[in-house]
């Protein structure tokens, strides 16, 4: 199991709900959440089956498709 963190430009819970359908549709993700209290609005993803490279691209693409940006911070 690995945990990846992504710095995003999400601003509020509305933004979090905008990415939810995209994140929920991704294969290989065990769980995800957004820390809206941090200044970098970190999306934390736990994965068990996908490689770091596969899940990084999938998450960055999914968040981008929802209209936001994500950058791996680990």
Image (spheres, grey):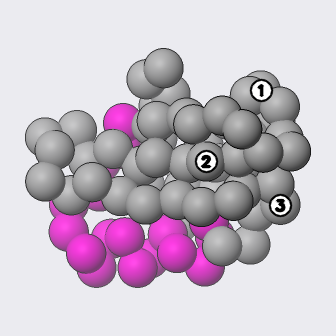
Dominant SS in magenta: helix
Q: Residue at x 55, y 35 (%)?
A: 4
* Tag 2 secondary structure: strand
> Relative to residue 33, is residue 56 depicted above or below?
above
Q: Which mark is residue 53?
A: 1
The residues colored magenta run: 7-23
Q: Residue at x 42, y 49 (%)?
A: 43
Q: Looking at the image, is mark 2 or mark 1 nearer the viewer? A: 2
**Do the CB atoms of the residues marked 2 and 1 lie less than 8 Å apart?**
no
Decide if residue 28 is on the left or right side of residue 60.
Answer: right
- How far apart, in angstroms, are the residues tagged by discs 2 and 1? 14 Å
Task: Name the quarter where the N terminus is drawn.
Answer: top right
Decide if residue 37 is on the left or right side of residue 40.
Answer: left
- How far apart, in angstroms, are the residues tagged by discs 1 and 3? 14 Å
Q: Quadrant of residue 30?
A: bottom right
Across the whole image, how many numbered discs are drawn on residues? 3
Q: Which residue is mark 3?
A: 27
Q: Quadrant of residue 3?
A: top right
> Relative to residue 54, is residue 42 depicted above or below?
below
Residue 59 lies within the magenta run: no
Q: Which residue is mark 2?
A: 46
Count residues near mark 2 (Cα–Cα under 10 Å), then give few for <14, some for 14-19, many for 20+: some
Q: Nearer the viewer, residue 6 or 45?
A: 45
Residue 38 horizontal/vertical position (percent): 16, 44
* Tag 3 secondary structure: loop
Decide if residue 62 is on the left or right side of residue 34.
Answer: right
Q: Which mark is residue 7?
A: none
Residue 12 horizontal/vertical position (percent): 20, 68
Viewer can see residue 61: no
Query: Which label's residue is closer to the chain start, 2 or 1?
Result: 2
Residue 15 lies within the magenta run: yes
Query: Which label's residue is closer to the chain start, 2 or 3?
Result: 3
């Amino acid at each position: 199991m690995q945990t990846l963190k992504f710095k995003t430009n999400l601003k509020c819970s509305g933004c979090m709900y905008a990415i939810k359908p995209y994140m929920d549709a991704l294969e290989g993700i065990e769980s995800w959440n957004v820390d809206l209290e941090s200044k970098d609005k970190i999306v934390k993803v736990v994965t068990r089956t996908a490689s770091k490279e596969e899940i990084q691209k999938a998450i960055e693409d999914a968040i981008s498709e929802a209209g936001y940006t994500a950058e791996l911070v680990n």
